[in-house]
Image (cartoon, rainbow, N blue to C red):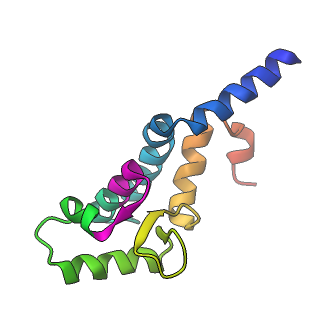
Amino acid sequence: MLSGVRDELDKVARLTDQGYLIDRILTPALHHARERESLTQMEERVLMATAHRGIAKAGDLKAAMPGMTEAQRTYQIRKLVERRMLVPIHDGARQYTVGFSNSVLLRGVIRALTAEGFIPEALNRPG
């Protein structure tokens, strides 16, 4: 029984490691959404850049949106906020984190968590 508890604590510890979370959960979730054409390549880059920063401002995302004007970047960020893929850190804030409550991204997160052993495969199969 204690080894089972230890295994579960190890899983929790892995999820608190930002590198592990980005590399093994968030990146595969974003790639899954991109493969399903639920995200554009630029949206995937913006979300990856935000994930790596933790909290990002529009100016931080400039490299992920090459060739765009400030107005175009603002428009793209607003679209991601409306789709709940970017979430302001508080109401009215212009700093964002990645929001995985969007069903398009959540599917990929569940898939990655299953692949990493956090969710039993039997729970991830349709009825």
Q: Residue furthest left?
A: 67
Height in image: 64 above or below 76?
A: above
Q: Point out the image quarter for the N terminus.
A: top right
Range covered by the magenta-colored residues: 47-58
Q: State the predominant SS element of the stretch in magenta.
A: helix
Position of residue 18 relative to residue 49, above or below, is above
| Residue 118 drawn at (x, y percent) | 67, 36
**Residue at 14% across / 78% down in the picture?**
69
Residue 107 image position (x, y, % from top left)? 56, 56
Q: Report whether 110 appears left or right of 22.
A: right
Picture coordinates of residue 35 (x, y %)?
37, 54
Query: Is 54 inside the magenta-drawn segment?
Result: yes
Image quarter where the C terminus lies is bottom right
**Residue at point 32% right, 61% down?**
46
Left or right for 115, reference 56: right
Say if 15 sits above or below 50 in the image.
above
On screen, residue 64 above or below 29: below
Decide whether residue 1 is among the magenta residues.
no
